[in-house]
Amino acid sequence: MIARLTYFGLNPKDVDDLKRIYNEEVVPVIKKQKGFLGAWLLEPTNSKDQYISLTEWVSQADADAYESSGTYKQLVGKVKDRFLGEPVLKVYTAAETKIMTPV
């Protein structure tokens, strides 16, 4: 699994508008992309921290196709004018772990 995280600062007055756009305009488009697994908007509990948009993908190829299609850039463009500074994208591969079940 591939996780793409976009970190960005946000003016508190823009929070409600960002959430609306994310849920009504961004997520429906992402859901239609090949290999999409999930999307979350992470709101910081400390007002000095950044917001994070987290998307999960089946494979690196799916995540790369989403990026190279221009869809990511287009969707960021819907909300970028509300950001404080430039967004930062980081991509991770989920490490395989063994989950222990309680006995």
Image (cartoon, rainbow, N blue to C red):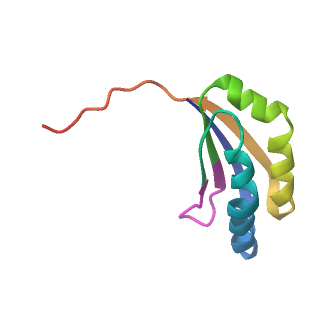
**Residue at the far bottom in the pictured view:** 13
| Residue 35 falls in image quadrant | top right
> In the current view of this chain or complex, which residue is farthest to the left?
103
The image shows residue 84 at horizontal and vertical percentages of: 80, 60
Q: As rendered, which of 32 and 27 lies closer to the eye?
A: 32
Q: Main secondary structure of the magenta part?
A: loop
The quarter holding residue 90 reads top right
Q: Residue at x 75, y 28 (%)?
A: 64
Residue 69 point in image, percent of width and height: 84, 34
Q: Which residues are magenta?
A: 41-53
Please count the marks in the image: 0
The residue sitting at 33% across, 26% down in the picture is 98
The percent position of residue 89, horizontal first and vertical second, equals 73, 40
User: Residue sitting at 22 percent across and 36 percent down?
Assistant: 101
The relative height of residue 45 versus residue 60 in the rendered view (above or below) is below
The answer to whether residue 28 is above or below residue 98 is below
Residue at image position (81%, 51%) is 76
Q: Is residue 49 magenta?
A: yes
Q: Quadrant of the N terminus?
A: top right
Would residue 26 be found to the left or right of residue 100 on screen?
Answer: right
Q: Position of residue 65 (x, y in %)?
A: 77, 29
Judge whether 9 appears above or below 66 on screen.
below
Q: Nearer the viewer, residue 14 or 30?
A: 30
> Quarter holding the C terminus?
top left
